[in-house]
Image: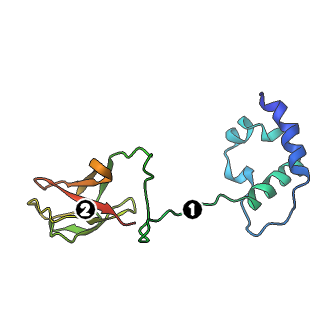
Amino acid sequence: MPTYRLIPLLAALLLGTSMLHAEQVAPLQERMSAAEFKAAGLDKLSPQELQNLDNWLGAHAKTTKQVVTSDGKPVFYMPDQKRSKIDAHIVGHFNGWNGHNVITLDNGQTWTQASSDAPSCNASDNPLVKVKPSLFGAWLMYVDGCNGDAHVERTH
């Protein structure tokens, strides 16, 4: 359906929306570039229609649901979700694998060593890492400067 036909429908839906909401959200004109605003057809709305749309968006903020296992551990990938390789750097100094490593990456993720794998490694600061999906939901982490990888599990 063309955008110009959706505008009256959208406006009609929004006119009855309450002006009250708990959280202030920046208006669409501030959140979008001028080109995005125009491409969405929002420049055709009256100031009141635009205000109603902003109010509705503020009252219906995106919610997220955290999924955990039966023992309370967070689930980062659903079983049917495709997992892909992660390239990042370790934050700080890496001395090698010891069987109990907790590794923070520069993308904010935290991974914990899940096995006693101990490939030999050169100590280094902020080394490059590759985290790859393995079999049965497991993950392998390769740290640049090591001669092998270790099994890890994401903890944050």
* Few, some or many residues within 10 Å of mark 1 (<14, 14–19, 20+): few
Between residues 5 and 28, which one lies in front from this camera angle? 5
**Relative side of 76 to 102, left or right:** right
Drawn side of residue 137 relative to residue 44, left or right: left
Q: In the image, 125: left or right of 64?
A: left
* Residue 133 shows in this picture: no
Residue 61 seen in this snapshot: yes
* In the foreground, 130 or 64: 64
Q: CA distance from mark 2 to mark 1?
A: 32 Å
Residue that carries the numbered disc 1 in the rendered image: 65
Name the residue type under label 2: Asn
Nearer-N-terminus badge (2/1): 1
Q: Which residue is the site of mark 2?
A: 126
User: Hey, what amino acid is under mark 1?
Assistant: Lys
Q: Quick one: SS at disc 2? A: loop
Q: Position of residue 143 (x, y in %)?
A: 20, 56
Residue at the (43%, 61%) spot, across then down: 75
In terms of secondary structure, where does tag 1 sit?
Answer: loop
x, y percent for residue 81: 44, 46
